[in-house]
Amino acid sequence: MDERTMLGLLADRLPRAGDDAAVIDGLVVTIDMLHEATDFPDGTTRYAAGWRAVGASLSDVAAMGADPAAAVAVYGAPEFDDRVLAFVDGARDVCEAVGTEYVGGDLDHHEEFTVATTAVGRTDDPVLRSGARPGDAICVTGTLGRSGAALELFERGETERANGLFRFEPRIEAGRALASHASAMMDSSDGLARSLHQLAEASDCGMAVETPLPIDDAVDSVAGPDERLELGAFFGEDFELVCTIPEKRYPAAKAASPTPLTRIGTVVEDGVTLDGEPMPDRGYTHEG
Amino acid sequence: MDERTMLGLLADRLPRAGDDAAVIDGLVVTIDMLHEATDFPDGTTRYAAGWRAVGASLSDVAAMGADPAAAVAVYGAPEFDDRVLAFVDGARDVCEAVGTEYVGGDLDHHEEFTVATTAVGRTDDPVLRSGARPGDAICVTGTLGRSGAALELFERGETERANGLFRFEPRIEAGRALASHASAMMDSSDGLARSLHQLAEASDCGMAVETPLPIDDAVDSVAGPDERLELGAFFGEDFELVCTIPEKRYPAAKAASPTPLTRIGTVVEDGVTLDGEPMPDRGYTHEG
């Protein structure tokens, strides 16, 4: 059974699941697991890993338009050395960057370096994935493709620059600013294409997106023209916010967002397209 | 560096850590990671694993005297099949058993079966580990040694009985009933001996404990007299509450607790002893 089929079965059992974070009684709660084989390429510092892992959970809180209350993590590794402290420093610093607190966690002896993170937030009015309506503007915060570019740089051994790109700012402030305007929102952790498909499915509508997309300059510095769109629109793990905003609220939303907001398209009745061509519901595919 | 040295270093950096759960603004948050090699013996059903993993986090909420608000989990495994649904059923059922809700989580492709769980709770008056004072009664809920007995049964292939013992009831109601009486509290997940040492260290006092301890009947059915104390007092993973209660409040606390409460000793100035002999600060050691 693939992951999506299973998530569908689970959604039937867990009515509060299926968004970036679960919502219950004014709280949002999210949990993530990252591990060496798939999430931390060779050269990733533990500081960047702590920042990134906790940041990923804070991004889920941001995507609900919520105010973060705290974050915790489990650090699982074969041994506990100074790298634990570097990890915790990264975790603390990303929390500080968005005005919340890293309050601790646990250690676990684990063969593979594995991290679990939770962030908790508060909101009385969460923004779900299901509220997009035809005619709404489709918008994205910041720029896309930083993580894809980072991976390319890790492969080339340019680890300092790569680690820098890996430390992203969770869009907490933007999420809160957009919460009163957006009809639907999620983060781009699975890539723009999958985010659009997920918003379309949850909202029972379509998404018509057009180039140019706000692709990060770092992508241009590592990728040729063919790879550019792959890294920007399909790679994911960027933790920007993808949201839909009723047309008449779009100017106010754009003005309110502390992170630059780019309109990339319009919600339509059905189909997910890029420049009029079907945009596949997939993640990154290496071209070479 | 061993785990305890590292936890000491981390405590300096993370003032809100070091208890069963972190406390911030009326919320308690805890995160745990369990995995096949150390936590789920051969024969553990995924239903029991889901119950137990989420139960472990709920036990941390109970140990703070808090009211659970929600629980989430990540299920990490090489493949996603019907066992995911069994796990989720276990997770839901343990939440239901204590009046809270399992609100979802995530899936992660992971070579080793690995589970991360979080529970969130609310309390305005958390019970910390640091409030024990000489003269207080030392008490424990329920019986000790169930998990040790279960492990022995898994080794013998008596998996049905073992899985039954693995599904414990988190002491949420007892924790809330004891919260207004107890001066210090934690759960027995590292074993009674380590719990006593941790309470003693956090409260800067000693613990004088006397037999008989409330050891579970299941222990007697699997262990000889030599192993009995090992499984009951050192093995751990039992998720009972260990607390200290001012002498004059002890009768009211005993009456209020919905789970039988046994007095096992008295808080003293220093030293952790069992029947007058030093009680080592260690977990289980197999005698054979």
Image (cartoon, coloured by chain):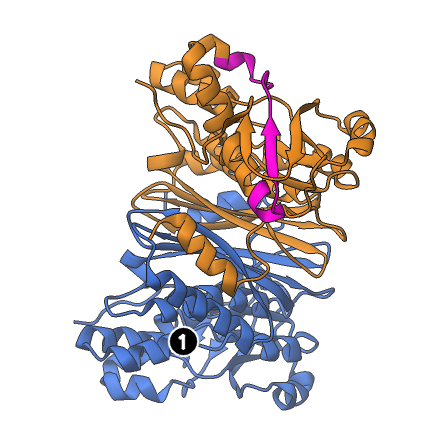
Chain colours: A orange, B blue
| Residue drawn where x is 60% and y is 38% of the image | A206
Label 1 SS: loop
Q: As rendered, which of B61 and B219 lies closer to the eye?
A: B61
Q: Is residue B105 above or below residue B285?
A: above
Q: As rendered, which of A262 and B13 lies closer to the eye?
A: A262
| Residue drawn where x is 34% and y is 19% of the image | A287
A207 magenta-colored = yes
Instruction: Left or right? Give the position of B94 relative to B38.
Output: right
Whole-percent x, y for residue A69 in the image: 68, 48
| Residue drawn where x is 65% and y is 72% of the image | B183
Q: Is residue B6 visible?
A: yes
B36 magenta-colored = no
Q: As rendered, which of B227 and B81 lies closer to the eye?
A: B81
Q: As rendered, which of A56 and B283 lies closer to the eye?
A: A56
Q: Is residue B123 above or below residue B144?
A: above
Q: Which residue is mark 1?
A: B167
